[in-house]
Image (spheres, grey):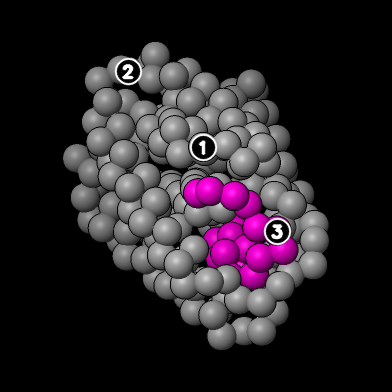
Amino acid sequence: MYNTPWSRGSTSRVVSGSLMGQTLGYLAGFLAVFSVATLVGVGLGTAGLWVGIVAVFGGTLLVNRAVARGGNALPWGIAVSAGMGILVGPVIWVSALTDPHLVVSALVSLVLAVALAAFAVAWIPWDFSRLAPLLMVGLLLLVMAGMLSWLIPHLTGWTLSPAYNLLGVGIFTGYLLVDFSLLKYRGLVYTGNGAAVLMATAILVDVVNLFLFLLMLGRRR
């Protein structure tokens, strides 16, 4: 879901298998870091919220900066993964303890969504990264609604509504399509491990956010 130079340039031929393999390898590593960090997030309590926010947003900026400058982006990708785990760990573990069936259902839906997005990008000859501007508008609306519900208690019901969470599911499924397209079609070649780390980090953010919205959408009222 990152705004990379790939989304602004013309696309070239299909990405090499080596880059795809590197991206999947980094993604597996980031998911492992994320999983461990969820346990840390539970232990940190309220402080984990701010630690996670700083790690995610700071890491995101530094990933993009390191990639653009041809530097080593891996440490910042790890920081984003750890921050995401710390940030959402309490939500995931509380859900797992109170309603494990909901977590399993959300995981199954997540796997299906990722598989369908990958299948669509692989077989449909169209660059889904063109959806990025539209998805950004939807994401901004989602964030604004979330901030208003946090600032104004009477609007808390917005973020609990099926419509809000269904919109979130749609947006992050769309971002999966965008990021898989950016993985498939390259308009810019970065040096070192930059491209693989950038795409693995972006896909991780998509997957985690999609999982959270699926959890909220399936929540028992």
Q: Amino acid at mark 3?
A: Leu
Per the model, the C-alpha gap separating discs 3 and 1 is: 17 Å
Q: Amino acid at mark 1?
A: Asn
Q: Residue 36: x and y, percent?
A: 25, 36
Whether the residues at callouts 1 and 2 have beta carbons within 8 Å, the answer is: no
Q: Amino acid at mark 2?
A: Gly
User: Which residue occupies 52% across, 38% down?
Assistant: 73
Pair 1/2: label in front: 1
Is residue 61 visible in the rendered structure shown here?
A: yes
Splitting the image into 4 quarters, where does residue 67 fall?
top right
Where are the magenta residues, as a range?
174-193
Say whether residue 80 is left or right of residue 146: left
User: Which residue occupies 70% across, 48% down?
Assistant: 3
Say whether residue 190 is left or right of residue 94: right
Q: Height in image: 41 above or below 107?
A: above
Q: Residue 206: x and y, percent?
A: 51, 52
Is residue 173 visible in the rendered structure shown here?
A: no
The earlier-in-sequence mark between 3 and 2 is 2
Per the model, the C-alpha gap separating discs 1 and 2 is: 31 Å
Who is closer to the viewer here, 54 or 100? 54
Under circle 1, the secondary element is: loop
Q: Height in image: 35 above or below 13?
A: above
User: Which residue occupies 57% across, 36% down?
Assistant: 71
The earlier-in-sequence mark between 1 and 2 is 2
Say whether residue 204 is left or right of residue 131: left
Residue linked to disc 3: 188
In the rendered structure, find residue 72 and report the number of the disc placed on it: 1
Asked if the magenta segment contains residue 177, the reply would be: yes
Residue linked to disc 2: 45
The earlier-in-sequence mark between 3 and 1 is 1
